[in-house]
Amino acid sequence: MIACYVSSHGFGHATRCAEVLRALRAADPRVPLAVVAAAPEWLFRTAIDGPFEFRSAKNDVGLGQRDALTIDLQATLAAWDAGQAEREARTEEEAAFLVACGARLVLADVPPLAFAAAARAGVPAFGLANFTWDWIYRHYAAQDGRFAELADACAADYAQADALLELPFACDNAAFARREPIPLVARRPRSGREAVRERLGLGPEPVVLLSFGGVGLDAFELEALGSMRDLRFLTAGEWSRLPANGRAVPHAELDRVGCGYEGLVAAADVVVSKPGYGIVTDAIGAGTRLLYADRGDFPEYPVLVRDMQPWLTCAHVPSERLRVGAIEPELRALLARPVTPPPRVDGAEVAAARLLAALA
């Protein structure tokens, strides 16, 4: 049994874990799998063939957010305090689960709790990440000294890991004593761009996907996009305030046409988003351009923006203009640029082989 613990912050951690578990199942279908995550169960079911155990649980605090682009530090501290009140009980609960299910290895991206529980259960633990929460929290210690306490606590848990499978766009992950670089873990579309567009009934006009993960689009005034009548704007899920040239594609429809969210990214000519690992690598894997907004004082942001440039056709738009839909100049300039060829994106297969070797 390999038990996978996923950070509760955003969908990027979940999508790359799902890719690694998909590769594990393909490499050795005999190995039982378990997922412990707050992300929707369907996200893993659509990626991983065959049976696996799923437990819905919040594994870490991450960062509180007011919306897709705004971080809430005080909400983060309040959530940390609430989590610490049950920290010992959660650690014991997860350690007991690992023993009961016969786990022989833990993969964690990268909730500190997973490493504490694995150590208590005597199970080897590997991280999967491009950044760690101790590094994130230490960045905010200059604004509020309490974040140093959070950083120290996370680093102590990470120190119990066997190794970190370190992804590209790597930040300062020194809390892990052993770090093993791997290639990019990226979802690749199951079908080609034109096939997905045909299944979704899209015409020849350029398609722009608005993508803001689990936080959503509620803070944005997107009616202004209606003036760009020659473009088609898409979102996933439910959305009631799109202009006449907009369309919300329910997740059930994506499942029905067999393309998944990565297929929706592939169908688009441009994705508009904040730069996070999940959407950046989806765009790289699909060969889709990215129009990205700044996302406040988030320390991963400058690393991603710097390192994604050689691999992705992308451009920046200020977040205050994105919020009101004033993105036309940057969007049209980006549509005129050719798509950058993708780099090596077989990190999931490399990670799976490393984990299977550890089991052996």
Image (spheres, grey):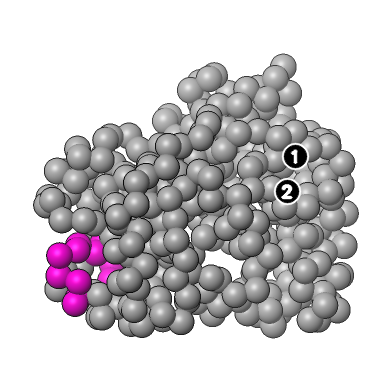
Could you say where residue 355 lies in the image, as x and y percent from the top left?
A: 67, 27
Residue at 43% x, 50% y is 313
Residue 270 is labelled as none
**Quadrant of residue 34 in the image?**
top right
The earlier-in-sequence mark between 2 and 1 is: 2
> Which residue type does callout 2 highlight?
Ala
Q: Is residue 76 above or below residue 231?
A: below
In-image side of 227 versus 354 (left or right): left
In-image side of 346 versus 245 (left or right): right
In-image side of 33 versus 189 (left or right): right
Who is closer to the viewer here, 98 or 276?
A: 276
Residue at 22% x, 51% y is 253
**Quadrant of residue 133 in the image?**
bottom right
Mark 1 and mark 2 in contact (Cβ < 8 Å)?
Answer: no
> Which residue type does callout 1 highlight?
Leu
Q: Mark 1 points at which residue?
A: 164
Q: Does the magenta stretch include residue 15?
A: no
Q: Is residue 234 magenta?
A: yes
- Secondary structure under the numbered disc 2 in the rendered image: helix
Q: Name the residue under label 2.
A: 114
Who is closer to the viewer here, 80 or 235?
A: 235
> Which segment did they paint magenta?
226-239
Q: In this view, does 156 lie above or below 227?
A: above
